[in-house]
Image (cartoon, rainbow, N blue to C red):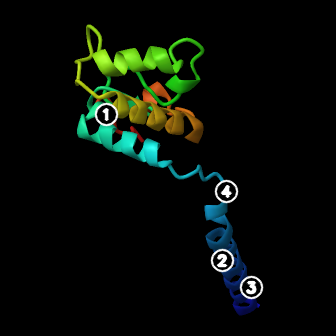
């Protein structure tokens, strides 16, 4: 009797594992970045934007979380964002980006915005930008 129960459980586990493997990558995936968004991602990395800004609640804390900045009614307007990206502010340095680099960074931020929301609770993020479990 116990052997039959273990065998049944093993078969159910095997079926469940196969279903998870086959169907898990088909749900909740965002789109791949366009060429401009990918180039903007490289600009983001080259200038270490994550040292001051967060994406999805993780990163630096000197600047704001930019995960959903493109959806903001005022700050998300491309012309508004481009001014900050190109010329900086009192707290953000001017990286002397070209118009093309600024547009690529805007494409990247739009792609990030479309990929999800910053749902990490502030109390779950350590000051270093890592999760607290």
Determine whether, in the image, residue 125 is placed left or right of residue 5.
Answer: left
The residue indicated by pointer 1 is 50
Task: Tell whether label 4 touches label 1 (CB within 8 Å).
Answer: no
Residue drawn 64% across and 63% down? Answer: 24
Spatial CA distance of label 1 from label 2 is: 37 Å
Q: Secondary structure at mark 3?
A: helix
Whole-percent x, y for residue 60 in the image: 31, 28
Q: Specify which label sits upstream in the sequence, 1 or 2.
A: 2
Spatial CA distance of label 1 from label 3 is: 49 Å
Q: Specify which label sits upstream in the sequence, 4 or 2.
A: 2
The residue indicated by pointer 4 is 27
User: 101 above or below 70?
Assistant: below
Determine whether, in the image, residue 17 is placed left or right of residue 35.
Answer: right
Q: Secondary structure at mark 4?
A: loop
Q: Name the foreground residue: 118 vs 12.
A: 118
Residue drawn 53% across and 19% down? Answer: 76
Label number found at residue 18 = 2
Task: Tell whether label 4 touches label 3 (CB within 8 Å).
Answer: no
Determine whether, in the image, residue 3 is placed left or right of residue 96.
Answer: right
Determine whether, in the image, residue 57 is placed left or right of residue 130.
Answer: right
User: 64 above or below 25?
Assistant: above
Q: Residues within 10 Å of mark 1 (few under 14, many from 20)?
A: some
The residue indicated by pointer 3 is 8
Whole-percent x, y for residue 86 in the image: 32, 20
Q: Specify which label sits upstream in the sequence, 1 or 3.
A: 3
Name the image quarter holding residue 114: top right
Whole-percent x, y for residue 55 in the image: 43, 34
Spatial CA distance of label 2 from label 3 is: 15 Å
Q: Specify which label sits upstream in the sequence, 2 or 3.
A: 3
Residue drawn 22% across and 18% down? Answer: 93
């Amino acid at each position: 009797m116990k052997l039959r129960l273990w065998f049944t459980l093993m078969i159910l586990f095997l079926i469940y594992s196969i279903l998870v493997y086959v169907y898990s990558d088909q749900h909740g995936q965002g789109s791949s970045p366009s060429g401009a968004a990918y180039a903007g991602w490289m600009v983001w990395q080259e200038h270490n934007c994550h040292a001051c800004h967060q994406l999805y609640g993780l990163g630096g804390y000197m600047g704001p979380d930019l995960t959903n900045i493109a959806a903001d009614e005022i700050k998300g307007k491309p012309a508004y964002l481009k001014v900050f990206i190109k010329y900086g502010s009192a707290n953000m340095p001017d990286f002397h980006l070209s118009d093309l680099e600024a547009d690529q960074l805007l494409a990247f931020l739009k792609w990030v915005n479309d990929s999800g929301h910053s749902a990490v609770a502030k109390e779950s993020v350590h000051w270093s930008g890592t999760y607290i479990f």
